[in-house]
Image (cartoon, rainbow, N blue to C red):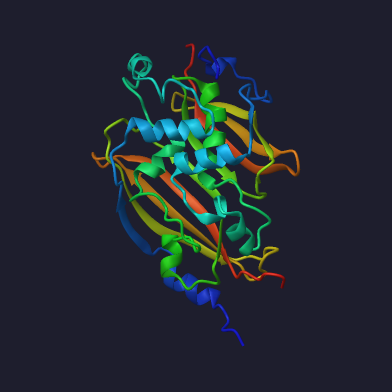
Amino acid sequence: MAEEYDIEKVRMEFIGKELGSTAGKYPVEYEPIRRHCQMVGCVNPLFLDEEYAKKTRYKGVISFPTAVPMFAAPGRTEPVKVPVVPALEVIPRRGDGVINMSQELIFSKPVHIGDRLAAKTRIVDIFKKSIRLDPEAIWVTFESIMTNQKGEVVCTLRNTILNYKIQIGG
Amino acid sequence: MAEQQIYWEDVEVGSEIPTSYSVEVNSALIVDQISGSQDYNLVHHDREHARSTGVPDIFLNTGFLSAMLARLVTDWIGSEGWLERLQFQMRRMHHPGDIVTAKGKVTDKYVKDDVHYVDCDIWLENQREGVGTPGKATVILPSKK
């Protein structure tokens, strides 16, 4: 018989837990912003054209908003079968299934070419909620606060993921 | 994207965000998704693996969905506007063959501490299931005053 997932014990132990810090592998650069814009067909010159952006109040190209978390990350995700999610590396897993359910991004300051970003992450909520794939699925919300090289907060990301037991044909 | 700067006074509650657009989920888009998001999780580009996890097919990743919604808003608010908050839920998946459309509507406008805010409902929908990615955005716009 499978061991029961003690959600109350997990909540007591892990809500509020710091997951450590990450530093962006590279500074903020033009090319990753261009590739991020290209994937959704964005041609806004504020993110792509230095000559145009110099004439705006930003005095130069700034990061497309949703590219910001990429610059605070230690590199690309690896092509692995079980996604590496820091929050799920520390709490007991329900299973190998992971789906990202919701995000909230708050953008506090523009991010400029050459900025170096870092992030501190902590778990802010853990709960159990049924889904079609698994009636005992576990939901985890974590918060990453991203700062620039001056220590200024540039972005806050709250991300809720669910962790479920894969039951093929079951 | 909008050619002219929009101002807070120009915005009417209940009006649609005029920069709606669509993308077709195909193999080229999947390649762009990986390149642009740096998300190499197999569920987003390896069909056999995706199906082994219990989902029907590969599906668009979080970075792509957030960027689609952000483009809808940043195309609209212009260089003098600021996207302050973007929130969304991933309730349905967008698979190859889907046409995904970004849309939005203004729900409120207000001034707080001399800052001119506009709240919006924003979402992504596809032809199979309708709205799959509902969300909200708060933007700051310049004022004519």
In this rendered view, identify the residue nearer to me: B83 or A80: A80
User: Where is residue A161 drawn, in percent x and y?
Assistant: 54, 58
User: Where is residue B80 drawn, in percent x and y?
Assistant: 44, 19
- Work out which residue is located at the far left of the displayed protein and give it: A150
- Visible residue check, residue A109: no
Q: Is residue A57 left or right of residue B126?
A: left
Q: Is residue B111 left or right of residue B98?
A: left
Q: Is residue A170 left or right of residue A48?
A: right
In this rendered view, identify the residue nearer to me: A143 or B47: B47
Quadrant (top left, top right, bottom left, bottom right) of the N terminus of chain A:
bottom right
Residue A28 position by quadrant: top left
User: Where is residue B125 drawn, in percent x and y?
Assistant: 69, 38
Q: Residue at x 34, y 22 (%)?
A: A58
Q: Residue at x 36, y 32 (%)?
A: A31
Q: Is residue B51 above or below residue A76?
A: below
Q: Residue at x 62, y 35 (%)?
A: B122
Residue B14 position by quadrant: top right
Quadrant (top left, top right, bottom left, bottom right) of the C terminus of chain A:
bottom right
User: Where is residue B59 drawn, in percent x and y?
Assistant: 61, 49
